[in-house]
Amino acid sequence: MAELSRFDRDFLKAVLSLAAKSDVDHLLYISDIPLATEDLRGRPIKRKIIYAVSGEKLAEDLRRRGFSAVLVPPYDYSRVEKVKVALVAGMTAGLLKDGELVLSLTGPTGLRGFDTVVKLRIGSGFEEKVPIDTIGLGAEFSSQVVEALVSLAMAIGHEGFEGHPIGTIFVLGDSTAVMEQSRQLTINPFQGLSEHERNVLDPRIRDALKNFSVLDGAFIIREDGVVLAAGRYLQPGGERPPNIPLGLGARHAATAAITMETKAIAISVSQSSGTVRVFKGGEIVLELHQVARRA
């Protein structure tokens, strides 16, 4: 592993010194290369550090060493997207709370160097589209289910299916109303399965969702993560068109519209770019861009 340059080492020292100040509640360290022992020597900030890493084994090792750690998907995000995903994961794990001041430190994927520091206060928002109170979704939604679906959507956007880009929609919550405003396009592959056999918190079901994402239509999912249907054509009944950014197509219009007409939230994956967007009340509340897609 290449050593840090003198400037990079000075940069890291400056961030760690800032993190040690009483005003700062947490340092969100987004990298699969942990801080060296000498970087922390003499700095009483171990309890403040939250590692955001992509490997379960590394996360477990860090926890054994007394650190807090959360898992993030192993994709090559831009710096801003890395911070967004790590913040949502930290909120989901209960490690970040409203009102806390957080410094986030990240850099190029797979390298030890750092080039980006973000300072924010939890609950005050991040950029114009990301209120970080579990993305402002409300207590009826399980943050664990939302995080699982966002991670799955990022995987679909990055990997596609057998090398081909695909898009899809996950609609979560207010399922009775959503089912009434949609119709089945194809055989529902989840019909007849017991509820514990079709919950998105089960990795096997997430793999199944990834495979079934080649089907036309949307997935309908209950608030607790139980998949009710795949291949649903969304037919929201409202007459007012959704206010979506120019350039987004019919999939995003349907996604926005169903969240205007029901209390559901919806997650779309763009076939053209792999971008993941979370909609609530017809508005985009989270937007995650892919840096690169698997060829």
Image (cartoon, rainbow, N blue to C red):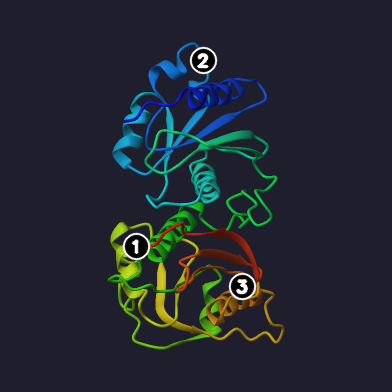
In three-dimensional space, the C-alpha distance between marks 2 and 1, rounded to whole angstroms, equals 40 Å
Q: Amino acid at mark 3?
A: Thr
- Which residue is the site of mark 1? 294
The residue tagged with tag 1: helix, strand or loop? loop
Q: Quadrant of residue 5?
A: top left
Horizontal side of 61 relative to 70 (left or right) equals left
Assign the N terminus to one quadrant of the image.
top left
Q: Is residue 257 above or below residue 27?
A: below
Q: Residue 133 at x, y = what percent?
A: 62, 49
Callout 3 secondary element: helix
- The local crowd at label 2, few if under 14, some if 14 to 19, many if 20 or more residues have their Cα within 10 Å, is few
Residue drawn 65% across the image and 52% down it: 131
Question: Residues at badges 3 and 2 in contact (C-beta under 8 Å)?
Answer: no
Residue type at mark 1?
Arg
Image position of 159 with respect to 96: above or below: below
Answer whether residue 194 is visible to the viewer in this image: no
| Residue highlighted by disc 2 | 43
Q: Which mark is residue 259?
A: 3
Residue at 48%, 23% (x, y): give it. 9
Cα–Cα gap, marks 3 and 2: 47 Å
For the residues marked 3 and 1, what is the alpha-carbon distance in whole angstroms?
30 Å
Residue 223 at x, y = what percent?
A: 50, 63
Q: Front-most of 89 and 107?
A: 107
Instruction: Answer with the quarter of the image where residue 41 lies.
Output: top left
Identify the residue at horizontal 47%, vertical 54% (top origin).
147
Tag 2 secondary structure: loop
